[in-house]
Image (spheres, grey):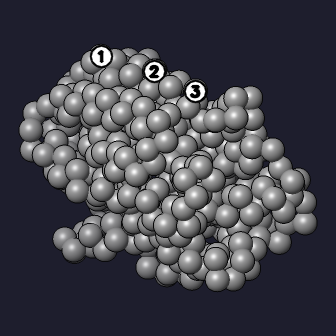
Amino acid sequence: MQTTSPATKWVMLALSYLVLIACFIPYIGWSVSLLDILDQFELSSAQAGLLGSITALVGGLVLPFAGVIGDRIGIKKIILIGIVAALIGQLMFAWAPDYLVLMLGRAISGLGVGLLFVGPYTMAINWFERERRSGIALGIMFTSDGIGSYLSLYAFAIVLTAFGWQTGSAIGGVFLAVVFVIAAIFLKDAPRDDAGEAAAVADADADGRSTISWLLSRNVLVAALFFIGEWGIFAIVAVWMPTILIEEAGWDPTLAGLLASLYVIFGIIPSILFGLISDRMNRRKPLIVAAGAVMTLSMALLTISLASGNYALVAILLPVVGLGVYTGMPVALALAADSVPTGKIGAVNGFVLGIGFIVGGFVYPYVMGAVKDATGEYTAGFVAMIVATLLLNLVAALFAKDVRRAPQPAAATAADRASEADTAG
């Protein structure tokens, strides 16, 4: 196995973070211009919601395969392919002459977004998990939701307002091209003890456990359910909340984008803090349960405020929802990663994030648009989200089981790692 400087993992973490931030422009950067797009192409609310849903659907379908392939060919290649796909989709969206090309651009962007979610997270875990510090690494990475949302919903909104949504979207493509060059030159995969990893995987699977069986293990399923609820909320906040604040409350698009981004900006502190705490304590489950409780209660209060037309309180409660979400996300994913052999981490990341994308990211925005078309308001859709949050983020978390991955020296034996896998199972 190669030796690297202790600082290298932090440099790789920073580069992975940059890539993940850039991913938010093709993912949600267009949403502050949704009303302009809706008017220009004469779309229904359901069609408009589908623009966000198709991105999540394609990204979610790609994510599980990206994790498995990345474990084999290297995560850096997955990241570079993802940036190229996101760039192509961004430019197609910017220059689309009709709704069909708009959808195609969003779908190709979804391919890139899917690769760019699983790639950087797996890169971070690969550099930190041998020191049993995956919690803090993931905590830092999940703060990219806050910075990325601020970049795409506020800073990028200024660009879209100044240049128009089409030219502004093309400028976003230029930013992605710059990030590609940086990643291609400086990013590199974590060194691996190939002989030891191959033996560990063989030993871990010697009892007949396939990759599928690991993906269907308790903690991985709990994490997947948590991410369905989380990503559904995120998709609604990113795609529909700026529109709600612009259309219903009459707020300026830039202000609406800023307030919507507070949902994730306020999640930065708990994401890092509780990721670090979960690395140092013997239990992650209580943090996940507490996060689900906060999410459910704050979503209920937010829905009541929305139904009563108190949009100022809606804006205040958005960060509270984010506090719950970003307390639970890094801890849930870290627990899932701790529960499987190291050779399965990429597959687990892809599965958990992919399920979140497919169900939460696709279903929620489309259904919200359909509810708006059918009822003329958004309240019923938010009531359904309360029930989903209760079941997916609180009740399901009660079934998690705490496990801890033992610290691994670089030259850990196959027998040691097989023992680790048995303990996780």
* Quadrant of res 348: top left
Residue at disc 1, secondary structure: helix
Q: Position of residue 306 (x, y in %)?
A: 48, 39
Nearest to viewer (mark 2 / mark 3):
3
Q: Is residue 155 above or below residue 331?
A: below
Q: Nearer the viewer, residue 327 or 128?
A: 327
Q: Position of residue 118 (x, y in %)?
A: 49, 50
**Can the viewer see residue 385 in this picture?**
yes
Neighbours of disc 2 within 10 Å: few (<14), some (14-19), many (20+)? few
Cα–Cα span, label 2 and label 3: 11 Å
Amino acid type, residue under disc 3 in the picture: Ala
Using the image, tell me which numbered label, if any, was put on residue 380.
Answer: 3
Residue at disc 3, secondary structure: helix
Amino acid type, residue under disc 1 in the picture: Phe
Cα–Cα span, label 1 and label 3: 29 Å
Q: Which residue is depicted at the point 39% across and 41% down?
A: 345
The C terminus appears in which quarter of the rendering? top left
Nearest to viewer (mark 1 / mark 3):
3
Pick out the residue farthest to the left.
281
Q: Which residue is depicted at the point 69% across and 58% down?
A: 34
Neighbours of disc 1 within 10 Å: few (<14), some (14-19), many (20+)? some
Q: Which residue is depicted at the point 43% across and 44% down?
A: 310
Q: Is residue 125 left or right of residue 87?
A: left
In the rendered image, which residue does mark 2 sit on?
387
**Can the viewer see residue 220 in this picture?**
no
Q: Which residue is depicted at the point 77% across and 61% down?
A: 37
In the rendered image, which residue does mark 1 sit on?
399
Amino acid type, residue under disc 2 in the picture: Val
- Asked if marks 1 and 2 touch (Cβ < 8 Å), the reply is no
Residue at disc 2, secondary structure: helix
Does label 1 or label 3 sit earlier along the sequence? Answer: 3
Does label 1 or label 2 sit earlier along the sequence? Answer: 2
